[in-house]
Amino acid sequence: MKEYLAEDFRKVTTHRLWEMKQRGEKISMLTAYDYTMAKIVDGAGMDVILVGDSASNVMAGNVTTLPITLDQMIYHAKSVVRGVERAMVVVDMPFGSYQVGPSEGLVSAIRIMKESHADALKLEGGKEIIGTVSKIIEAGIPVMGHLGLMPQSINKYGTYSVRAKEQSEADKLVEDAKLLEEAGCFAIVLEKIPAGLAGKVAAMLTIPVIGIGAGGDVDGQVLVVQDMLGMNKGFSPRYLRRYMDMYDLMTEAFKQYIYDVKSCDFPNEKEQYE
Ligand code: KIV
């Protein structure tokens, strides 16, 4: 196994991410939704942990990210924060917690920050939500933008296919990225867009651009932790690299346990009290 040895053990901040972009060090980011996973991910040296609203899919089994509530995101965020020492913890603002307007967005943002003790928030969208993004940043809360495929708008798109292949959509994405930087976002996630376009945005902005399905010419990468561990056999987008085959490993362990229980092999003498 090749290991990256972090030299900086201090808490990751927005400024440190900006410094990483300046010196060309790529930013590592993964999702986590619970204490145990967050502790392992942080202990491995991850720079950013995202409490993604993908919890709606991978933790709750919903088809989309839309049903997850503000209270549920706060629950996941609190659990993650308890397990993290070094990584920056970013929390997704869920669908319905900021779309009505800046005041509603700020109230939701303050709730997440006050109750979870997370470090920053992520919102999906560009021009349409720029007033809300500005209001949250003015209140002193760091915001990460999210453009390209925006799963909270899946009912508008009708498909999870690659975004911004057409020039007009690519132009809008570039404009939105500029607006988000001007509004004060400390970073932007670009999801599932052509690699050339993502590289152009990363070169244009001074803030870090983190990609998922956006190629290698960006400032960092993010994946959903269950996907990269191979826990979900039914999800195989081209951009996904599986680092383990956890589905099979876990199934093997569960089958062995069932066998041991049924055959009275577990518990043995050493695994019980006198
Ligand atoms: O919710 C999530 O997991 C995300 C990542 C895919 C970036 O937003």
Image (cartoon, rainbow, N blue to C red):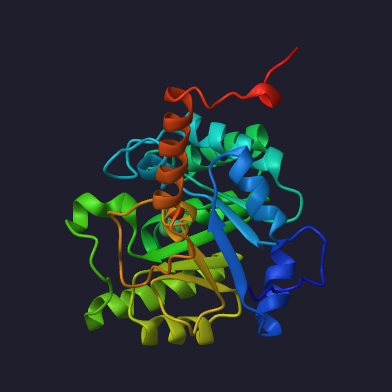
Locate residue 243, reporting x and y percent. 49, 65
Locate residue 189, reporting x and y percent. 48, 66
Task: Report the image quarter containing ligand 1.
Answer: bottom left
Locate residue 13, reporting x and y percent. 73, 61
Q: Is residue 3 visible?
A: yes
Q: Quadrant of residue 76?
A: top right
Q: Residue at x 49, y 40 (%)?
A: 103
Is 107 on the left or on the right of 88, as rendered?
A: left
Q: Residue at x 55, y 31 (%)?
A: 75
Image quarter in which the C terminus is found: top right
Q: Is residue 101 visible?
A: no
Is 88 on the left or on the right of 256, as rendered?
A: right
* Nearer to me, 145 or 239: 239
Q: Residue at x 63, y 73 (%)?
A: 1
Locate residue 41, reporting x and y percent. 63, 54
* Nearer to me, 133 or 228: 228
